[in-house]
Amino acid sequence: MGSAVVKITDFGAVADGRTDCTAAIAASIGDVARTGGGRVVIPPGTYHTGPIHLLDDIDLHLTAGAVLQFSQDPDDYLPIVRTRYEGVDCYNYSPFVYAAGRANISLTGKGILDGSADDHHWWDWTRAGGDAGDGPAKRELLDAAAAGVPVAERRFGSGSRLRPGFVQFVDCRQVLVEGLTIRNSPMWVLHPLLCEDVIIRDVTVDSHGPNNDGCNPESCRNVLITGCTFDTGDDCIAIKSGKDHDGRRVNVPCENVVITDCLMRAGHGGITLGSETSGGIRNVVGERCTMDSPDLKRALRIKSSPRRGGVIENVRFRDITIGSVADAVIEIALDYENVRSGPYPPTVRDIEFSRVTAATAAPALNLVGLPEAPITDVRLIDCSFASMRSADRIEHVIGLQQ
């Protein structure tokens, strides 16, 4: 990365929370890229903006007191770009911070990324019923993928009501996100997709809308998530590898993922693998994490179904401290969404839990395999579950050691 340093205010950005700073930020990034790369600085203040697209060798740095406040107008996120919506490739609204095919890019600093999503903007798209919601577009996208429609022809955006993600990097190398607070996302918050060598460090995610997963490394290789805090409306961390037909078409696993020293508060799961597992997930380590909230449904979770397929293997959780969770401490469920039969039963094997402790939950274990796809080789070593409110559920599991 080069040594250039510029401020967006030098290119006309105004910190009044009203002036559209999209063009000024793009000009700043373009100027630094032309000189070989460097840092684009967001000074203290609130800057109203549309989508931000990073280029090679750019560090977008938010100083303490800086807020990037993203527009609530969907038209500001046009033209559409290549993206992935819930595990299926398509063209859709631009994510708020986006890069495709870039190298050596970063988001750093002590500032705030505010997506401005609420029940009247973005979140209402999925909560509305019938044609007013996102259901028709979701069905159209899934049907197109199943029929083998080329990705270039899966075009959504205006009128479709498929929400954009917040931070999405597609097919990028050497990615760093560090120090920031991210809040109020339309849906998935941090979504590295088909990326390699990713570090997400000391980030706080506070976002409680629908499908507001905190971090979703999908079909990535070599990912470190460390020192982060997640308080979310869906899974805190969910490792993924594509959905159904599209996941099998692309067929890229998510592999070599390390999660350390994170704090999980509210969410559907603390550390989750799935449910989009079609490309496979392997070589995952989660250690020294703390999870505690009555609004955290499950702590450690693997979820898939015989529609998904994929091999999930070589997963290690160790030194995980869990206070209160609403449902299971450990869940491996291959009947996600109550789907118990299908042509692509997943394979789940070689899963180890060491020194996992929990104060209170419903069951300690909810392990549900399938007759044609039993869960194999699950090991619990030096684990302690203090006050469980219900009995374990264990079905179609081979080689359970506890």
Image: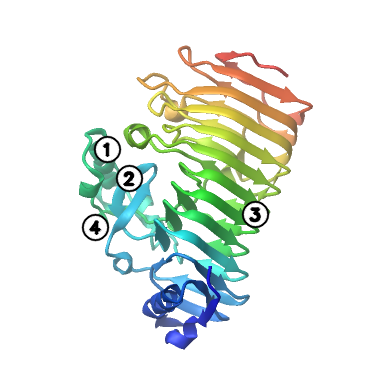
> Between marks 2 and 4, how big is the CA–CA gap?
18 Å
Q: Which residue is mark 4?
A: 159
Give the x, y percent position of residue 92.
Answer: 30, 55
Looking at the rendering, in which quadrant would you find the C terminus?
A: top right
Q: Earlier in the sequence, mark 2 or mark 1?
A: 2
Give the x, y percent position of residue 378.
Answer: 64, 21
> Is residue 213 something that shows in the picture?
no
Q: Earlier in the sequence, mark 2 or mark 3?
A: 2
Is label 1 or label 4 in front? 1
The amino acid type found where label 4 is placed reads: Gly
> Between marks 2 and 3, how big is the CA–CA gap?
28 Å
Q: Are marks 2 and 1 in contact (CB under 8 Å)?
A: yes
> Between marks 2 and 1, how big is the CA–CA gap?
8 Å
The amino acid type found where label 1 is placed reads: Ala
Q: Which residue is mark 1?
A: 145
Query: What SS does tag 1 mark?
Result: helix
Q: Which residue is mark 3?
A: 228
Q: Are marks 2 and 4 in contact (CB under 8 Å)?
A: no
> Is residue 115 something that shows in the picture?
yes
> Between marks 1 and 3, how big is the CA–CA gap?
34 Å
Q: Residues within 10 Å of mark 1 (few under 14, many from 20)?
A: many
Of the numbered discs in the image, which one, if any, rests on residue 14? none
- Name above or below for residue 207 compared with residue 44: above
**In the visual, does 201 lie left or right of 99?**
right
Q: Are marks 1 and 4 in contact (CB under 8 Å)?
A: no
